[in-house]
Image (tube, helix red, strand yellow):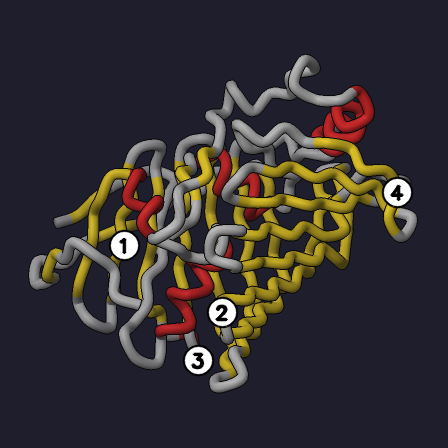
């Protein structure tokens, strides 16, 4: 079976040595949870800033932050990843390609450039190929709610990869003043808390903390290494620290070879001998 889809591809992992590769994919889109009540992320339209829902200072800071967004239709990058969970340390690469609001394609590559798999996400579906186990998965996008503490959409995932401030329906941002000389904004619901600090000079993100209050899980993302891409600030270096019960996971990401608005293709082919599975094992 072959999908000749213009502009997208996805990454996968193995059940053995490529386990960290798949986990990083999940971690990039928030730590996994299938037991807590899901956070609902707004659609692209509903994530517009509503002045009736925000206090004026929060609205001002978030609007300034949104002015830093890339004006892109196409985006690609290679992400060098250092993974450490105190038991295992591994380096690998994630090749990412995106067409805005249309496709998200990721290829995960381990040592010596060996590709573990691909992931393709569209506005309504997710496809995963695990090359090492010769398996593939295809599910509606709602499948992601089984491995994430939120219901999400493609624009939300793309915004996270690009390092933007995120808006969640049902959790209006509240400006909390300055903390360590940074703007502090917090959004909270009964299920989660999202705290972000932004630099006052240009309103770029310094750090964000997403806490799942139901399961006492937390993800901390630190944004560093800002450079200019298409005249907009972009964080080329990020650290992701995840706490899940007694587990502590660390991911250090370095974005390289960034290209904006260069037309891309997204090869994604399901081999005739691949076995279809209805869930991802990790």
Q: Relative to 223, is 143 on the left or the right?
A: left
Mark 4 or 1, which is nearer the eye?
Answer: 4
Mark 4 or 2, which is nearer the eye?
Answer: 2
User: Disc 3 or 1, which lies upstream in sequence?
Assistant: 3
Decide if residue 83 is in sight here.
yes
Residue 97 position in % (x across, y down) = 46, 47
- Separation (CA) of disc 4 from disc 1: 43 Å
Mark 3 or 2, which is nearer the eye?
Answer: 2
Dot 3: element:
helix
- Residue underneath mark 2: 245
- What is the number of the mark on residue 128? 1
User: Disc 4 or 2, which lies upstream in sequence?
Assistant: 4
- Separation (CA) of disc 3 from disc 2: 30 Å
- Residue underneath mark 4: 178
- Separation (CA) of disc 3 from disc 1: 20 Å
Residue 73 position in % (x across, y down) = 53, 31
Q: Relative to 127, is 216 on the left or the right?
A: right
- Identified at 48% across, 86% down, the residue is 87
- Do the numbered discs 4 and 2 sit on residues whose CB atoms are within 8 Å? no
Q: Relative to 7, is 161 on the left or the right?
A: right
- Residue underneath mark 3: 111
- Separation (CA) of disc 2 from disc 1: 28 Å
User: Disc 4 or 3, which lies upstream in sequence?
Assistant: 3
């Amino acid at each position: 079976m072959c999908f000749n889809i213009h502009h997208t591809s996805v990454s996968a992992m193995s059940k053995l040595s490529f386990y960290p590769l798949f986990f990083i994919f999940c971690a990039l889109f928030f730590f996994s949870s299938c037991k807590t009540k899901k956070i609902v992320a707004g659609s692209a339209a509903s994530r517009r800033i509503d002045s009736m829902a925000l206090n004026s200072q929060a609205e001002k800071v978030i609007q300034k932050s949104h002015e830093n967004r890339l004006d892109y239709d196409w985006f690609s990058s290679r992400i060098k990843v250092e993974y450490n969970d105190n038991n295992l340390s591994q380096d690998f690469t994630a090749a990412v390609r995106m067409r805005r609001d249309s496709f998200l394609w990721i290829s995960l590559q381990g040592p010596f450039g060996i590709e573990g798999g691909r992931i393709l996400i569209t506005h309504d579906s997710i496809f995963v190929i695990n090359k090492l186990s010769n398996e593939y998965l295809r599910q509606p996008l709602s499948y992601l709610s089984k491995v994430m503490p939120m219901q999400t959409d493609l624009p939300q995932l793309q915004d996270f990869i690009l390092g933007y401030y995120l808006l969640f329906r049902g959790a209006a941002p509240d400006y909390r003043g300055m903390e360590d000389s940074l703007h502090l904004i917090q959004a909270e619901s009964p299920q989660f808390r999202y705290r972000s600090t932004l630099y006052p000079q240009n309103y770029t993100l310094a750090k964000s903390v997403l806490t799942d209050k139901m399961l006492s899980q937390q993800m901390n993302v630190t944004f560093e290494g800002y450079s200019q891409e298409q005249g907009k600030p972009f964080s080329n270096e990020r650290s992701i620290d995840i706490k899940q019960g007694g587990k502590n996971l660390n991911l250090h990401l370095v974005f390289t070879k960034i290209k904006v608005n260069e037309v891309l293709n997204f090869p994604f082919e399901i081999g005739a001998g691949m076995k279809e599975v209805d869930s991802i094992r990790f």
